[in-house]
Amino acid sequence: MKHRYLPMTEQDQSEMLATVGAESIEDLFADIPAEVRYDGVLPMSERLSEPELLKYMNGLAARNADFERYTSFLGAGLYDHHIPVVLNHVISRSEFYTAYTPYQAEVSQGELQAIFEFQSYICELTGMKVANASMYDGSTALAEAAALASGATKRKKIVISRTVHPEAREIVLTSAHGLGLEVVEVGFKDGVTDTDALASAITDDTAAVLIQSPNFFGCIEDVKAIEPLVHAQKSLLVLSVNPLSLGLLESPGELGADIVVGDAQPLGIPASLGGPTCGFFAVSDPLMRRIPGRIVGQTVDRDGKRGFVLTLQAREQHIRREKATSNICSNQALLALCASVYMSTLGKMGMQEVALLNVRKSHYASECITKGSLDIEFASPFFNEFVVKLPDGVDLKEVNAKLLKAGYIGGYDLGLAYPELQGRMLIAVTERRTKEEIERFIGELEAIV
């Protein structure tokens, strides 16, 4: 009979000590001077039996406000979307779940094909020519896009809108410091990038302009108005997008984007207490050889049979370091598979339907709010998130604590990242929210404030 875990008995311990010629466990540490050893017992609990440990760990897990026991209206980068049941069945197969980097193509065809399909889906979704095998997450993908743009244009200035996710902006700033890049932030009007300020910020030394749409406030940017401003100075347009929104919105490729990045979390990836997620990265043809990470290519073997290989790996592990365009050394293969299974399960019509549900339900919620005692902060069109203005002096932390007691995970406090937006709550409404949940949540929010 096979056992996953073998217990350590006193007899086992005695036999091992005898084999190595020691009389006690203490003898194994005889060469370590007493003055550098820890004197006493480490500050930890007593050992627990398996039933006791399970009970303790379940108690800790129960303290988390998960999406099954609470109704979530929190987005801000991680969303409560429906995950098809088939998805977990596929990604839990050992062939995928335990797969490592597919360095040996001849024994990794299944993994390589899964990644190739992911790349194909991302290209179709974004309207771009080439996509890589995925990135760590959407924020690091945006920072990599800034680095790529600087290398391609030989310029050192990055212009980024303040409507981009604040954590993504921080990561761009961190990466820029190491690369010697200047980062200029541009403000917003009515929830979208201030195009006049943007036009003034773009100069002939600007490598790229970084825009998020739908942006952090949920608003849809006027990319058609921004694109000519960027390309007039021969700069690159980098768009960070919510992939689910592309079920309805015009593709970034059609809007003139040079680089498209984003986080695949809305595509069947659980929020999982903040991650891990999966970033995607797609570019136009001229930038193909500068793309970070790795690309899986399709080819044929000597017998003419279709096969898959790793190709165009512009990272320091594979080419001379001074020629590397990135230090990204891996990709999120399992989570990219999640996104691929999600998109293939829904299909084109399903993606459109889910995106439409997000739009309709979030707009129904905003209409309910404006009919009540609260206001919406911005009038710009939005996808599935919008900003609610609460009465002056309201403590949003206290509001969310009361909502949690009532069974709701409230919205994001925008005052944490935007001092000028104190008392504003960013609310997300996905396809999982029902009409009754929306109405009860708004009623509870109005009662609290």
Image (cartoon, rainbow, N blue to C red):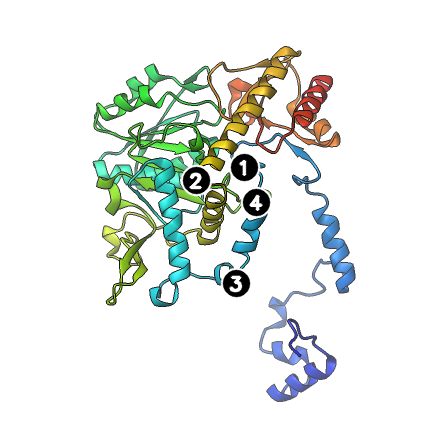
Report crowding for label 3: few under 14, some 14 to 19, many 20 or more residues within 10 A (C-alpha).
few
Which residue position holds label 2? 138
Drawn side of residue 393 relative to residue 135, left or right? right
The answer to which image quadrant residue 225 occupies is: top left
Tell me which amino acid carries mark 1.
Leu
Spatial separation of the CA atoms under disc 1 and disc 3: 27 Å
Which residue position holds label 1? 78
Report crowding for label 2: few under 14, some 14 to 19, many 20 or more residues within 10 A (C-alpha).
many
> Which is nearer the N-term, disc 1 or disc 3?
1
Secondary element under disc 2, as helix, strand or loop, is helix
Nearer mark to the viewer, of 2 and 4: 4
Which residue position holds label 3? 94
Tell me if residue 371 comes above or below residue 215 in the rendering.
above
- Front residue (pair 360, 150): 360
Q: Residue at x 49, y 48 (%)?
A: 338
Residue 45: percent from left, percent from top = 75, 58
Spatial separation of the CA atoms under disc 2 and disc 3: 27 Å
Spatial separation of the CA atoms under disc 4 and disc 1: 17 Å
